[in-house]
Image (spheres, rainbow, N blue to C red):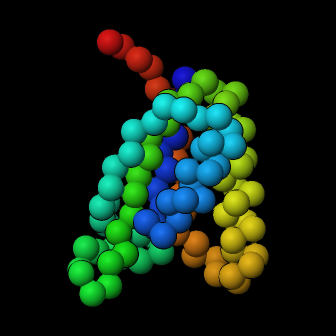
Amino acid sequence: MEMLVIVFRESLVEQVHAILKDYEVTSYSELHNVTGKGETGLTSQFFLAPSTNRMILVAVPEQSAQRLIDGFKRFRLGQEASTGDLMFPLHVFVLPCQQVV
């Protein structure tokens, strides 16, 4: 098993959920109002300029993880090509995952 950690701007939630659905991901945990600082800048919960992230955790078999990663890569590359912005606010990380309880 592998754990995918998907971090993205709130504005992309519909597209990210669509990708999960397209790849038949039915179980995941979702964290709202995730803030921090990274290559795409600072996120905050300031009410005049909200730019918070969401984080989705998905535990899937290794083969499914690779298919899903490829789907997110295609989405990100398409968005970067259409906007010309190479700092698109979507990142996917992979961690080893073992269910113990």
Residue 19 vs residue 91, the one in the foreground: 19
Q: Is residue 6 above or below residue 36?
A: above
The residue located at (36%, 13%) in the rendering is 100
Residue 11 image offset from top left, x and y in percent: 48, 70
Tell me the quarter of the picture where residue 20 sits.
Answer: top right
Residue 46 vs residue 40, the one in the foreground: 46
Is residue 78 shown left or right of residue 41? right
The residue located at (73%, 66%) in the rendering is 77
The residue located at (55%, 59%) in the rendering is 14
Residue 24 vs residue 51, the one in the foreground: 24
The residue located at (67%, 30%) in the rendering is 64
Is residue 94 shown left or right of residue 69? left
User: Can you name the residue that lies furthest to the top here?
Assistant: 101
Total numbered badges shown on the rendered structure: 0
The answer to whether residue 95 of the structure is visible from this angle is no
User: Can you name the residue that lies furthest to the left here?
Assistant: 46
Q: Is residue 74 above or below residue 39?
A: above
- Of the 4 image quadrants, the one containing the C terminus is top left
Q: Is residue 59 above or below residue 42?
A: above
The answer to whether residue 64 of the structure is visible from this angle is yes
- Of the 4 image quadrants, the one containing the N terminus is top right
Residue 39 image offset from top left, x and y in percent: 47, 72
Residue 71 vs residue 91, the one in the foreground: 71
